[in-house]
Image (tube, rainbow, N blue to C red):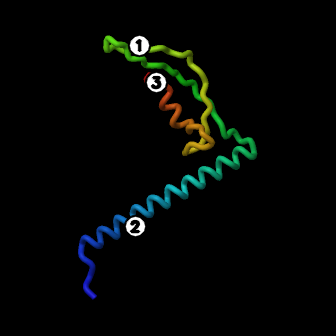
Amino acid sequence: MPAPNLRVRLRRWLLATVLFAAGAAAVAWVCDLAAFEIRVERKWNPYGSVIVYHYYAIPQKSGKTQFIFDPPAPQTCVNTLFPHQGWLPCWYLKGHTQQRTDM
């Protein structure tokens, strides 16, 4: 039986790499979820809070944009790698404290 050509070998290598990456991501998410559930059950500080600055950007007819700022407010987040229960991770929220809503 002849050896597979380069195209077949590359296709197999790419498929193996994609499957490995998807499997690793799934295992990381399941472990993160399990750790979060344990922290919730034992009340080991699963939630955090970050001060967020929210503002609205309203386009005007003249082509300019009017900004309306809300007072800074704390936002709940989770101390995990991935989002859980509808909350963003604290590491992400700390890097995105400016939240803009375009109208």
Q: Nearer the viewer, mark 1 or mark 3?
A: 1
Which residue ends up furthest to the top in the rendered image? 62
Q: Position of residue 100 (x, y in %)?
A: 46, 24
Give percent across and percent down for residue 84. 60, 43
Residue 80 percent location from the top left of the image: 59, 43
Residue 48's quadrant in the figure? top right
Q: Is residue 7 left or right of residue 45?
A: left
| Residue at horizontal 56 percent and vertical 39 percent from the top | 89
Label 3 crowd (10 A; few <14 / some 14-19 / many >=20): some
User: Which circle's residue, 1 or 3, is located before the other in the chain?
Assistant: 1
Q: Amino acid at mark 3?
A: Arg
Name which residue type carries label 2: Ala
Residue 13 image offset from top left, x and y in percent: 34, 68
Name the quarter where the N terminus is drawn: bottom left
Q: Is residue 8 above or below residue 61?
A: below
Chain-order first, disc 2 or disc 3: 2
Q: Secondary structure at mark 2?
A: helix
Residue tagged 3: 100
Q: Which mark is residue 16?
A: 2
Establish if 85 lies above or below 49: below
Q: Amino acid at mark 1?
A: Gln
Question: Which residue corresponds to the image point at 61% horizontal and 38% vertical from the top-left?
Answer: 78
Residue receiving disc 1 = 66
- Is 53 above or below relative to 61? below
Q: Label 3 near label 2: C-beta < 8 Å?
A: no
Identify which residue is drawn at 55% across, 45% down: 81
Seen from the viewer's position, the closer of residues 19 and 67 is: 67
Q: Quadrant of the C terminus?
A: top left
> Could you tell me how far apart the alpha carbons at marks 1 and 3 are, in whole angstroms?
12 Å
Asked if the residues shown at circle 2 and circle 1 are in contact, with their CB atoms under 8 angstroms apart, the answer is no
